[in-house]
Image (cartoon, rainbow, N blue to C red):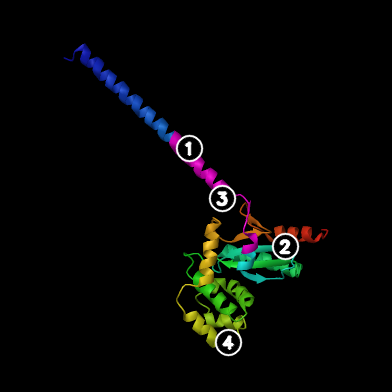
Amino acid sequence: MLSRQSILDSATIIVAACTFAVTSVFLYRQLGQGASNRAAQGASARRENRPVESWTQQLESGHRMGPDSAAVRLVYFGDFACPACRSFAVSVARVVQSHPGALQVVFRHYPLEYHRYAYASARAAECAAAQGRFEPMYHALYAAQDSLGIVSWNELARRASLPDLGRYDVCMRDTSRIARVERDRTAEENLKIPGTPAVILDGVLMLEKVVSAEDLEARVRNARRIPR
């Protein structure tokens, strides 16, 4: 038969164990909630629009489409195999068609590793750029996005009206990393941009929402003081 002291000692141990368990659960929840809050705050901070100090440098470093005198200028980090990038390119095309000469787009590469044909598409664009045909290849690649890997690279070159297909073939067979593409990727990573399409619009990195054709249209109208 247990003595009274043994019973008291056992009860004390049980109470202590329960207290420890409750405290541990409380601390775990508090720490978990704190980590979640910090992660949410960090994600929110990354998604806030913010000015880019190297705006002029960004403009000078990419492929320019549209005049330097355009009322609205933007830098666009894109991936030719990215569906959201293609949608943004369509929005840009709508505004360019509605307001010729009012919008300049400076394209910079950010091919994502998990898009199978992203880097090869960037190479095709650069091989075309070497012959002064970047913009036609830009449009050809986005138009054929669903067929990348099916439509031949030579066929895309023909669609972009490259003058020297032999030179283009030699360029496409090169398997080394492309200096301009790697420089553009580094620039995006330094800006801590979470993905593509990434748009710097008149010096402001737009992260709060996807920039739509309506947003660009409004910018152009305001910049040119065009009434609705």
The secondary structure making up most of the magenta span is helix
The CA distance from mark 2 to mark 1 is 42 Å
Q: Which residues are magenta?
A: 30-57
- Disc 2 target residue: 72
Give the residue displayed 50% in from the left and 41% down from the top.
Answer: 38
**Farthest-out residue, left:** 1
- Quick one: 5 or 72, which is closer to the camera? 72
Residue type, numbered disc 2: Val
Establish if 199 lies above or below 131.
above
- Disc 4 target residue: 164
Q: In this rendering, would 146 be left or right of 105?
A: left
Residue type, numbered disc 4: Asp
Q: Which mark is residue 34?
A: 1
Indicate which disc, 2 or 4, sits on the residue closer to the N terminus: 2
- Disc 3 target residue: 46
Establish if 34 lies above or below 79.
above
Give the residue displayed 23% in from the left and 16% down from the top.
Answer: 7
Observer able to see residue 93? yes
Q: Position of residue 221 (x, y in %)?
A: 78, 60
